[in-house]
Amino acid sequence: MVSRLAAHNDLGTSPIGLSINNGSYAGTLAQMRGYCKEADCDFFAQLNPYKSYGKDWDEIGRQSYTLGDIGAWSTSSGTIEVPRTAFRIYGRHIGWLGCTVAHEIAHIQRNHVFMANYYSNNTIRSAPDKTKGELSYAKSREQELEADRDSAVMMARAGYKGRICVDDLVFLHKSSGDGSATESDSTHPGYDERIKALAAFYEKLEKNPPAKSNPTKGHLTYSPADNLLSFIPTKP
């Protein structure tokens, strides 16, 4: 999937890493077991699901795989985290997985983590706390819509037909049971807003298909010990 995206898109000059983990539901399960507090459970979500850690922790991984949802995310350093359960849920729908990966690549390319942090700590620094919080959440939602649009363009360039990333978003929300509306403290747009926004973008994209992009030449490496697949762009 990454190779296909790279063959038709400019993915930059920095390595992109992909790692499979337990997923966010593992953090919820760990909290339920008393292993961590709500804000400190990422460690369990990011555990390597292909290693054994002992009875209780392995059971957290098993339940996360059978009960969790897709919920991929990316880091500012260039690593995309994909829960193991995503492959079970997506099944044969590899194109939908591509939309999810492209969405996270977009976050990395646009430095969204840094931009959100800078916005919160500099641009709106003097705003009242309540207003600052609302503006920060609004910024997060804006970035999600931006990454949605970028993923649609990347997938179209890679030769995927139709509104595949709209189909992916519908599937994502239904598979996770998330029919939420957009609220002032939502980090992501609600179901209706997000689907409507991406559908409107596809309408424009269909009238004016994206221009071809230079391919990103590179190679893939895999480290079982690190549970990390890396795409390494070739230096120009």
Image (cartoon, helix red, strand yellow):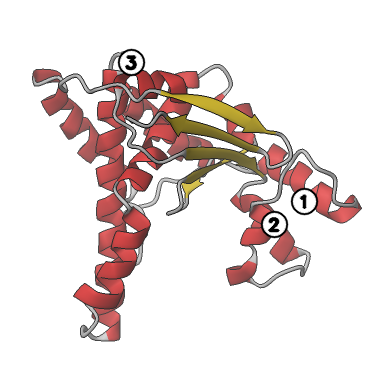
Kindly report which numbered mark, 1 or 3, lies closer to the viewer in this rendering. Answer: 3
Task: Name the residue type under label 2.
Answer: Phe
As drawn, which residue projects farthest toward the front?
A: 236
As drawn, which residue projects farthest toward the right?
A: 55
- SS of the residue under disc 2: helix
Residue position for label 3: 160
Residue depicted at x 50% and y 19%: 93
- SS of the residue under disc 3: loop
Looking at this view, is 153 or 165 the one in front? 153
Q: Residues within 10 Å of mark 1 (few under 14, many from 20)?
A: many
Residue depicted at x 29% and y 69%: 118
Residue depicted at x 25% and y 68%: 119
C-beta proximity under 8 Å, tags 1 and 2 = yes
Residue 9 image offset from top left, x and y in percent: 30, 25
> Disc 2 and disc 3: Cα gap in Å?
35 Å
Task: Name the residue type under label 1.
Answer: Ile
Looking at this view, is 197 or 226 the one in front? 226
Looking at this view, is 200 or 125 the one in front? 125
Decide if residue 186 is in sight here.
Answer: yes
**Closer to the N terminus: mark 1 or mark 3?**
1
**Closer to the N terminus: mark 1 or mark 2?**
2
The disc label shown at residue 60, or none:
1
Residue 205 vs residue 166: left or right?
Answer: left
Residue 27 vs residue 13: left or right?
Answer: right
Residue position for label 2: 44
Q: Quadrant of the C terminus?
A: top left
